[in-house]
Structures are given as C-alpha cells and as structure tokens.
Amino acid sequence: MDSTLFHYLDYAVYGTAILVMLIGFYGTMVKKSLLKIVISLSVIDSGLNLLIVTIGYYKGGTAPIFSPGFLKNFKDVSKMVDPIPQALVLTAIVIGFGVTAVALALVIRLYRHHGTLNIDEIKNLKW
Amino acid sequence: MEMIHIIFLIFLGGAVLTYFAGKVSKVLQDIFFLLSVLVPAYLFFANVGIGKEVTLTLGGITLVWGVNHFSWLFSLIVLGLGSMAAIYAIGYMKGKERKGYFYFNFILSIMAMMGILLSLDLVSFFVFWEIMTWSSYLMTVYNGHETQRIGIKYFVFSAIGAYAMLMAIVIVHHVAGSFMIGSMINFYPNMSLSLQIWIPILFLMAFGVKAALMPLHVWAPDAYSNAPMAYTSVFSGALSKMGIYGMVIVLVTMINQIPQGFWFREVIAWLGGITAVLGTLWAIKQDDAKKLLAYSSVAQLGYIIVGIAIGTELGMLAGLFLAVMHALFKGTLFMVTGAVEKQTGTTNFTEVTGLIRKMPWTFFAALFSIIALAGIPPLGGFVGKWMLYEALITSNHYLLVIVIFFSSTAAFLYCYKFLFGFFLGQEEKEWAHVKEAPVVMLVPMIIMSVLMFVLGTFPGLILKPINSGLVDLGYIDTFKHLWNTSIIFNAWGDHVVLQPILYYIIAIFVFFALFLTWKGHKTTRYVTTKDISSSGEVPAEDENLTFSVGFMQPFLRAVAPAMRRQIDKYYTGIADGLESLFEFMRRIYTGNGQTYAVYVIVFVVVVLLFKSVLF
Amino acid sequence: MVGTPVLFIAIPLLAAFLIPLLGMIWKELVRIVPGLVLTYLLILAINLLNHVLVHGPIVEVIAGWVPPIGINLVFSAFSGFLVTLMIFLGLLVWIYSYRFKRNVEYEPALKYFLMLMMLITGSVGIVLTGDIFNMFVFIEITSISAYGLTAFYKGRNSAEASFKYVMMGSIASTFLLLAIMIIYSQLGTLNMADIARKIHLMNPTLKIVSYIFFVTALGIEAEIFPLNGWAPDAYAEAPGPVGAAFAGIVVKAAVYAIIRYTYTIFDLSSSFSFLIIIGMITLIIAETAAIRQEKLKRMLAYSSIGQMGLVLVAFGFGTKEGVFAALFLMLNHAIIKSLLFFSGSYLVYNSTEKNIKEVNGMSKFLPVTSLLFAIGAFAIVGLPPFAGFWSKLSVLTAAADSNMILIMVLVLMVSVVELVYYLRVVNRIYFFKKEADTKPHKPTFNALFVMLVLGAIILLIGFYPDAVTGMLHKASASLMDKGQYIHNVLSLK
Amino acid sequence: METVLMDILGAVVTFLVAFVVGMTYGGLSRKITARVQNRKGPPWYQNFIDAFKLGFKKSAIHHGVMHHLGGAFLMVSSVMTLMIVPVLSHNNWFPNLNFQGDLIFLLYIMTFGPLGMALGAGQTGNPNSAIGVTRGLSQMVGFEIPWVLALVALMIQYHTTSITGLMAAQAHSGTWLMFSSPFAFIAAVMAMLGMFRYSPFDIVGAPTELASGPVSENGGKYLFVMMSSGSVFTFAKLTLYVDLFMGGADNLLILLVKTFALYLIPMLYGMTTPRYRTEQAVRWFWGWPSFFGLLAILQAVIF
Amino acid sequence: MMNDKNSQKIVDIIQNWARKHSIWVLAYGTGCGAIEIPPTMTSRYDAERLGVRGAATPRQADVLLITGYLTVKTMKRVIRVYEQMQDPKYVIGFGSCTINGGMYYDSYNTIKVLDKYLPVDVYINGCMPRPEAVLSGFAQLQKRIAEGRANGAQQYKDNLEWYRANQKKIIPNWIMPEYNW
C-alpha cells in the first residue's frame, strides 16, 4: 500500500466526516420538513462521531482491547488506538439516539396538532 | 439601640402594623397611622441632638445616619407637614377604599424622606431615595386605571434620575474609595476635571427630577394631580424639597469649588427661571384645581431653584425660606382642594362654584395660602419673594429678575382663578347641600395658615434655623446683616421692617372694614348671587351664570406663542419611537425554529471570522 | 467529612429511576419521594457548604481513578454555593408543584417528577463535575429532561417549543462535542484541572476555536442572545414551576459552565471582554423584546434572558468584585424569578393564552399572590429595600471599579426599560378592571407557602444582605483562585 | 405714645391730602377731557360731589363678606403705597413708613388691593365682574414688565432698592433720573398708561360691554370707598413717579406741578386713542415699552 | 347749639345738594327715545355740566330713564332694574308714550301709564322730546331733589302692594323671585 495514498486517505476520512456534518447542517437549515430536519440532526451526529473516532485513530493502530497475553508483546500497547474517543462516541451515540427519539415523538405531536410537517407553518410561538 | 434607629423602626413597624390593623378595625388603623407619624416626629425633635451620628454596617457597607443643622431644617418641613397631612388624611381618607395601602405608603414616604435627610453616606441616601420614589409612585397610581400611564411616566423619570445618581455614587466610590458623603466632598477637589463636571451633573439629574426642574418636570403636573390630595400636600410640599436639599448640597459642596461652577449656576438658575415661567403659564390654562396647583408647584420650585442656584447668602436664604413657605402654602392648598373634592366630588372649576358661604374656614385657609403664594405682604410668601428679588438684583441677575417677576405676577392670574373657581362666583343650586369639611381636616389647614401669617411678620423664626443650616454648609452667619427677627435686609443695606408694616396694614384694613360695616348698617343687606345686575334679566334658580370656561382667555391668547410647544409631546414622541423600535427588535424572534438554528450557525461563523478582532 | 459530593448525583438519579417502581407500591410515593430526596440533599448541601466555607474544597474521586485519568467531583465554595441554591430551588419547585394542575393525576405526576429529578441531577452534575466530557453527559441529561418538561402539557403549543429546544440542543451538543474533541486531540486529557494546567501548550487558534465552540454550545443553554431562540417559547409553554426551574437551575448550571471554562480552563485574556459584549447584547435585546410582550410568561422569559446577560457582563469584568456581583445576581435572580414564575402562573392560572391582560384586577381575588408578584417585580428591577438592589449596586460598583462607564450607562438604561414593563404588569394586577372571562384560582397552600418563603428571603436579603454576602465573597474568591483549584484536584492521590 | 399719635396724625393728614388731590385731579381730568371734546364739562369739584353722593346713598347691598370687604382691601393697598412713598423730600412732617419698605415691597403692596378687590368682585357672582377682573389682571401682567424693567434699571444704577435711597442719589447727583436714565423713564411712563387704566387700556371696566366690570355690583358706600381709594392711589403713584424720576419735591406746590404734569400724559394719550383688546394691550406692553426697559437696563449696566 | 332736628335739616340740605349735582343715569333704552340720549350727553348739549352722567349698572345709578314706550315684555326687566337700584332713586318718564301711551295708545302690548307701575318723579313730554326738553327734565328733577320732593322711591315702598297688583295684572306669568325687594 502506498504511504502517500494512505496519507491522503487519512485526510479523506477527516474530510468525509466534516462533509457529512456540513450536509447535516445544510439539511437543518434549509429543509422545511420536520422529519428531514430530524434526520439532518442525526446526520450531523454521525459525522461528528466519525470525526471523533478518526481523531483517536492513527495509522496502523489496533483495537484497544485487553486480551490475555496482550502485555507480552509490549510493542502492541503503543500500537493500540486511543480508546477514550471510542468510549465517548459510544456515549454520544446513545445520547443522540435519545434525542432523536424525543425529537420524533415531538414531530408526531406536532403533526397531530398542526396537520403539517412544514416548519414554516409551525410558528404559533413568536416574538 | 440609638434613637435614630428607633425612629426608623417605628416608621417601618408602624407602616406594617397600620396596614394590617385595617383588617381588624378602621379606628385602630387610624390611631396606628397617626401614632406612627406623630410619635417619631416627637421623638426626633425631642431626643435627637444635632450633630449626632449612628452607624450600621450592612453588606460590607457602612451606613451612617446623623443630623446636622441643614438636614434638621428640612426635617422640620418633612415632619411638620407630614404630621399635619397625617391628621388631615384621617379625615380625607374616611370612607375611601384602600386605606391601608394609602397609610402604608404615606408612612413609608415620610420615613424615606427622613432617611434621605439623615443619611450621611451615599448608599443609604440612594436606598431611601428609591423607597421614596416607589412609595410616592404607588400613591400616584392610587386612583387606579387611568393613572397608570402617569405613574409610569413619573417612575421612569425618577428612575432615570436615580440611576444617574447611582452612577455618580459608584464612580465616587471608585475614585474616593468610600461611600461617605463627607469623603466625597473632601475628595471632590482632587478629581479629574471631567469627573468634576460629570459627577454634579449626574447628581443634579436626580435632584432635578424630584425638584421638577425643566426639562425634567413633565411628570410633575400629572403625578401631583393624580395622587390623593392628602398625600399630594406632602408630595408637593415636602417630597419635592428633597430635590432641593440635594441640589443645595451639590451646589455648595461641589459646584462652588470649581471654576466652571459659575456656568453651572447660571444654567441651573435660568432653567429654574424658565421652569417658573412655563409652570405659571400652564397653571393659568388649567381648569382643574389639582392640575393648576401641580403646575404652580412646578413654578414655585423654579423660584426656589433660582434662589439656591445663584448661591449668594441672600439667595440661599430666599430659596430655603421659600421652600419652607412652599411646603406650608402648597400643602394647605392641596388640602383645600382635597376638602373641596371630598365635599363636592369634583375639583373642576367649571363645575364647582360659590362655596365660600358653605365652607368658610376652608376658604379662609385657601385665601391665606393664596396670599402667601402670590407673595403679597403681610404673609410669609412676600418675605421669600423679597429676598429672592433682592438677591437677584444684588448679584447682577437683571434679566432673571424680570423673568421671575413676570412669572410671579402672572401667578396672580391662577391664584385668582383658584379662589374664584372654588369659592367665589355664583352659588349654584347644585352645591347647595355642601357642608364645611370635617374638623379634623380643618385644623391642620388653619394651623398652617396661622403659621404663614406668623412667618410673614417674624420670618426670623424660620430664618434662624436656615441660617444655622447655611453656617453648617460653610456660609458665614447672616444674622444681623441680612435679617433680624422682623426685618430683612439686602446686600446693599436696604431693608423692609415687617412689624410696623403689619400694624399699618391691620389698622387700615380694620378702619375701613369698620367703616363699611358701620355706615348704613341698617340699610345694608345681603342679596344672593342670583340677584345681580344682569341687564334686567331674571336668572332662574337653576340657571348657570358662572363664568368659568375659558377663564383667562385674553391673557392666554397673548402668550399663546410661548405655549405652542410642549416638552411633554417630545418625550411622548421619543417614548413612542422607542416602543416601535422595540416592537421591531423583538421580531428577531421569528418563531421559526429553523431561523434560530441559522442564528446559531451565523453566530459561530461570525465569531470565527472575527476571532482575531475579538480575541 | 459530613457527606460526599457524589451523593448529589447518585441519590436523585437513583430516585428518578426508582420513582416508577415506587409508584407501583403506592401512587402517592411518586410525589413524596422527590421531596424527601431533595430535603435530604438540601441538608447535606448546607452541611457540606458550611464545611467547605471553613475547610476548603472537597474533591471527590469516582471509581478510584485518580485525576487526571478518572472523573472527579469538586465541591468548592463556588460550586457548592450553586449546588445548594439549585437544590433549594428544586425543593421549592417540588413543594410548589406537589399537586399543581395535571400533577394531581398519577401518570403525569410520575413523568413530571421523574424528569424534574433528572433535571436537578443533570444541573447539579454540571456544576460539580471536574471532567469536560462528564459535563457533556450531564448537559445532555439536563437537556433531555428539559425537552420533556417543556412538552409536558398536551393542550398548548408545548410540542412546538420543545421541538425548537431539541433542535437547538442538538446543535449545542454537536458544538460541545467538537470543542471537547479539539481539546482532547490537542492535550489528550479531559480533566478540567489538567487541561487548565496544560492549556498554554495548545495551538492558539485551536484554543480560540474550541473556546468559541464551548461558548456557543453552552450559550444555547445559557440563553445568550442569538442562541436563545428556544428560551422564550420553552419558558412560556412549560409549566410555571418548570419555568422557575429553568431560570433558577438549568440556566445557572449553563452559566456556571461558561464561567468555569472562561475563568479556570482557558487562559484567554480577551474572553472577558467577549463575555461583556455578548452579555450586553443579550441584555439589551432581551429587555427591549420583553417590553412589548403580550404574554406574561414570555415577558418573564425575556427578562430572565436579560438577567443572564447581565450576569455574564458582571462575570466579564474579570475582577473579584465582578464575580461577587455576578454570583449575587445569580442568587437574586434565581430567587426572584422563581417567585415571579410561581406567583405569575397563579395569576394566569386558568388561561390558555397567558396574556398579560388576563392578570387585570387580580389583586382583589389573589391578594397575597399579587403582593408577592409585586414584591418580586420591584425586587428584580432593583428597587431598595428589596434583594435586587444590592446585587445591582454591586454590579455597578464592580463596573465602576473596572472603569466601564459605558457599560454602566447601558445597564442603567436597560433597567429603566425593565422597570417599565414590570410596572405595567403590576399596575394591571392592582388597578385594572378584571377581564370578564378570566377565572381566578386561589393558590394551594403549598404554593402559597413557597411564595411566602421566597418573598421572605427577598426581604431578608434586602434588609440584611450580610446573610449571604459572606458566603458569596468566599465563593467568588474560590472561583478566582485558579491555581488552588488545579492544585486541589491534581494533588489527590 | 406721643410718637404713635404723631404717626397716626401724619398718616391721616397724608391721606387727606392725597384724597383731595386725587379727587381734584380726577375732576380736572374730566374737565379737560370735556374741553378737548369741545364741551363745557362738569366743574373741577364734580368728583367730590359724586363721591359724597355715593357716600350719602341710603341703602346698599352686598353679596357676602369678601364683597363687603373688597373696598377695605383696596384701601389697604392705596394707603400703604401712600405711606411708603415719601411725599415731600427734606421734610420731616409726614415720614410715615418711608424708611421701612422699599420698591419691591411697594410693587407687591400695590397688587394687594386689586387682588382683594378682585375677590370682592368675584363674590358678587356677576360674570361681568369676573371677566373684568381677568382682563385687569392680564393687563397688570402686561404693564408690570416694562415697569419692573425700569425700576431694576434704576436700582442697578444707584445700587439701592429703596425709594429714599434713589431720591438721595438724585439729590446728590443733581440731575433727575428722567434725564440721566431716559429709557427707564420712557418705559415707566408707558407702563403708567396701563396703570391708570385710561383709554386705550380701559377694557377692564368697559361700561357698555362689561357694565363697568369689577365694580358692577358696587354702589353707595362701597363705590365711595373704591373711588376714594382710586384717588389716593392716583396721588400715591404720581408721587412715586415724581420721587423716582423727577427728584422728588420740596414743597407741596412743586409736588402738585410735577404730579399734574405727569398726570397729563396718560390723560392726553387716552383722549387720542381708541381702546385696545386685552391681548393687544398686553402685547403692546411687551413690545416697545419693554424694549425701552431693556435699553434702560443696558444703559445702567454699561454706564 | 343746634338741636337734632336742625342739624338733620342741614345734613339733608348738604346731601340733597350733592344728589342734585350728581345724577347718574341708567338709560333704559326701551323705545325710540334712546336715540335722544347721545346728543344730550355729547358736545352740543353736554349734560355732564349738570353732573349728569351715565351709569353702567343699576347698583350705581340714581335715575332710571325710561326712554319711550314700554312693552309688557320689557316691563318685567324694568321693574327688576328699578328694584335693584339703591336708595335714593328716581324715575324719569321720557316721551309721551310713558305718560299716556302716546301713539301706542291702543297697542295690545305696551303699557299706557307708567305711573301705575313705577313711581315716576318727572315726566318729559314730547314725541320725541328734544335734548333741550331732556335737559329741562333733568333740571326739573334737580329742583325737586333740592326741595326734597323727589320721593318716588318712598312712595313705591309705601304702596308696594298697589304697584305689585298693577304690575301683576299686566304681566301674566309673574316669575319674579322673592328676593327682589
């Protein structure tokens, strides 16, 4: 495997994550449907999670899992990727799931109340 | 526990007790109310020595309260007028709703005014100032719905003033390192020039609002006329004097210390003069007694401001003497209006007429106060006016003296209008049932009228404490060279000897009064006001012949150009403009969740773009 | 040791999840248990705070991992003060909402108190934690329970408000995580003390970016101006006591977080002036928006936003006096705004629109509630002798000491605006004729008790500010002393 | 005791002199007016006859105590003015109150009467009276401005506010104030036109329009007292002008000459001019007269 | 020493002299005769030299001048004005109409003989009387005053009931208030 290509690929992962986030932001700001907004929020979350995991990764790392005999080869320890971002991402995913659930529940109620999913028409509260 | 603390506790406890006593019994409430005004007044004058100081530490701030001669003089106004108005209020409030509310705020106002006078540090000064403001505000809106706009106007002006003062206070604290008034004064000469100019301006804004100095006076007519009359007599008589009190201190201890002070004093004096003129003109225009008196209060405060702003010894004496007199006569006049309002239910000149024979004692009080107000000898108002003119002339304010003279001559017009509107003129059938006011309301009025008379002949009685107060402020003793017990001098040595003049006046008056009464007394008869020479026409009993609509029309036509513009309108315009702006501003919150999300992103982007500027 | 800070998180969280189970035993337990828990926590908090004020901060290590690796809780004078305040308010909210409106029924009461307990857990956690990711978790706990509470009523537009809140909250969490990740990628640690120690090693640009992200994320919760679109809606649509909880608990926690980042973690000198700018803008926009409101709770919401702006301004002075003033403001705001929300929701109890004109003439029917609302209004405007005056005085003194004349002028001008709209409401309560279709509702005994307690506190602080100023001085000193904080946390073994 | 008696005697004598002179001037004014109008006119003593006749009226009515005492109020101001004004300089006969009041006191005591009278007029309930009063008071505000401007100019020129002081200053400098400060004199004389209420400033008591205005309900003894008061006041005012601007008078004859000369001014001016409306009158006083008053002050300040 | 009666006489003489030379006239311009008043008062005839002078209100007036015919409607006002005048007071009937109705002798709404309703002291005849006649009328009145014979007011007071009866007879709706006299 070419190292330069790998190098670019490294950036490409970052870029993809950020791109996914930007798509999410775009959807949040532009799409009028409540559902699309909720999806966009999820997309932002996904991009962000990807980004975080990427930060923790470095080239050639291994999964940060203690296994029997792991300590025998001391070199492996430094090869392990940072486990903390992964732990954080796990938490973040859970939280994101919760939020999405709440958001969808609200969308249902809004749809029942207003009979539409267009966010521009849900403006009873203003000024 | 010091006596001063006890006095404040009585006020405070009395206010709360009075409020809740109303739930038990109305009489008990009245008694509590009287006691909680009169007892502290007695304790103050009997037990609090001048020069005494007590301290209290609160929130890391040392609060110092004490009395000096100058604040003692104002205490005299506050507690004296307060006691009188309290007695009057018992009668005035009888049968009215929200008595507890009234009494509570009344006592708190008195307490706050005393607090202002006794404060030797700026924080307690400000605290009491604000308590005074809101308690008087609550009184202003006592009459309910219609008054709320007026009340808010009053409160907004007061708040602007008070906040200006608060700013000055914290700046002083910053530079002088202490909240004490004494240290502020001591440090003042060491301040930077801009502070030396701005600190007095900020203070004067606060005091100017309370003293109804143009252009900060627009709240006054409405507020004075809409509070209950029993309170307005204190409001106009004593509460406005707090502004004067503050002004004197600022003028003497700060402005006189700096070379730019001359311009300050000129500007304030001229503002006072213009206030006097405008107040007078507008007072003439009013058809409602309350409004008339309210504008007249503004005008009278203008004189007082002129007196203290020119700052000579005689000017100070004049201003403070007028302040005392104004408390007396304007207090009485508002009481008179209240009595008329209570007995007839209205205070409009176009409705009430010819009460003189129904309410003779009230008329007597009104007559005396009007004579005092107009500054006609031999009542006290003249002494104040005389000293003011002499002070203005001897200190080379030639044009100002004309301005003041114009306004005090024009004041005759509204003085007459007041007396004529209520008491003189046709005795209409509509008011035939009207009775004299209750004794409890009459007594304070009569006492104050007599006081006006006494002070007119022996002004020394009150000039003495004024003199002590001025000596406290650093003026030289003016006794014997500006006044004697019954003689007043000007700086050029001319003088008026009041006592023989009084004798002459009484003698001439009594002689001709006797002459008129004695001569042909058998064939002199009383005829009703319907029996007038109206070109032979016979007015019916229920025909209204009274001349009261458009009363001073010819004069108003003559001065119409000066009254075309109203400062009030400008303020209203500004307020409306601001409200529209705010209405526009709140549309930022569009109600669309997406917009809010965009705001967030925009905020982040903008801050990131300008991060080199911001960070 | 009189107790450990971890109890503040463990007990309410446990209670929150036990409530449904307990409700199966006896339905009333759903309402009683939160109160017992909060009472216990309040006693504990006061004990700990007393201890802390004398002996210095308590640092608690969770699960045996010593910082900087493990998560730790810090109960200093500063955070302890806020925790005590929050729990006290939580207790009051509980008493007030014991049988408030829909809480009479079992099902809603269960949800309500569950979410309330989680809200308190989260907020207390934000204040106590010493780990930035942990703080993120607590913020999310707080947010999700806040979404739920906002959407509590079915009849109104609460879902709309809640949805806006969810949108903003999600974006907030995104930025928060981004910021956390930037710091982690640069410094490799999540412990606040550790970050604070190493922050100078960070790339300056990234430092600023991460600070901005933090402020954005937390600013959404703390109602900073362009980020606070959700706030008026949520305040207006959530139940009255929840409004009080937002103003007194959630926002306080968010502001705490901002302050912690600004004072302790980051070493950006110009972040103070940034705080002043955004605080000032928030103050001005919110107060000017409040004056034209037609709905009572919306007006209170804007006022709340404005007060938070003022708090940020006071923190932005960066001096000990400024911090003291800000803490004093936070205390007063928590108490007074709670009182306003409590009494205000009874003034417009039976109304669906919550229009201001529906409070007309309520003083005849609800004299005590009206009086307390008036006291609250006077206090929040800063009229002496009520509590608000002293905090306003301290803010201005701090401003003068920092030579910020313009800030003083603006703050005072905005105060006038604030005065006007509060006076208008008070006038309506007292002097207007009752609208024909409003139906006054007498406050229940517990609600009245809560309001009276708050009123008494307002008067107490007003007449005797020394009751709290000593504590506030210590709290502000503890915030200012960054080195001590780092030392306290990292010296643990 | 003796001094008190002497004081009283002096006051009474001064009063009588003023009464006689004032009445005579009134009669002369009627006579001269008649001659100007090519009439024979009443005898110079006609005013005395009128006054006595009014005094001899058998019955009188009043509308209440203020109306009853209105004349007494009026008298107080007239007689007090007379008492304050030094009638003859260098003369210890009638010192009265010369040294106990000054010009500002005088200005105020002069307004005492009209106001008291106005109260009496008000109590009659006659609308005409009240209208007359409002006109009178308005006009007073008008002419007080040039009058006070003139007086202030005098005061600042000689650094005294007392009448005797001004007289002494004139005696000392040897010139009359009407020559040394002519603008003040012009302003004061123009103000005097209003003070005397001759045409064109007689709208106060316009006989056909207002039925003589404030006095419309007064007859008999009340009118008598008012007439006498008016005469005394006329004399007092003329004497004041003489004292202020013409150096006072050493004996009665010179006083009469000077006062009569002054008295001719409003009288003759009135004969040639029709009546002003109130606001016209007020504006007239705030026009040229006030301008001259300002000039006077300017002169006093500069020189 | 004079006794009281004599002194009273002297006082009367002085009083009557003053009254005689100071006649303040309230000209009630009831009819066409009012036009004759201005020439009487102005330069050509100059009644003022006799002390005659206009008065603005009945309170100040001495003489009530009824200038010409008097309608029933005006009658009420005239009575009221007369009663508002202060003692001593006189009435001059001016022109034939006040004497016997003159050219309105058969009019339904003018009064014919003034004397039945008000105590006339002096009549001036003529239709209209010229200013000379008016002056002579004043002179006549002066003469009567000086002699103390112009006591119409006294007469009115003494015979008030008779006058009232006459007045009420001609004025159908007598709404004069009681305070009149």
Image: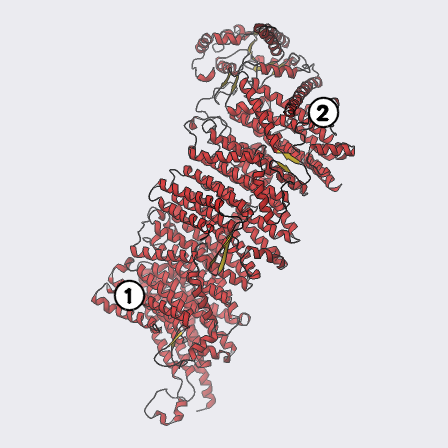
Position above or below: E145 against C211: above
Q: Amino acid at mark 1?
A: Leu
Chain holding disc 1: C
Front-most of C91 and B218? C91
Q: Which residue is mark 1?
A: C36
Q: Is residue D184 above or below residue C165?
A: above
Image quarter in which the N terminus of chain D is found: top right
Q: Tell me the SS state at disc 1.
A: helix
Q: Nearer the viewer, residue D77 or E141?
A: D77
**Chain under label 2?**
D
- Above or below residue A121? Residue A10 is below
Residue extending farthest front? D1
Residue B427 percent location from the top left of the image? 46, 26
* Residue D259: image tag: 2
Q: How many marks?
A: 2
Residue closer to the observer: B244 or C420: B244
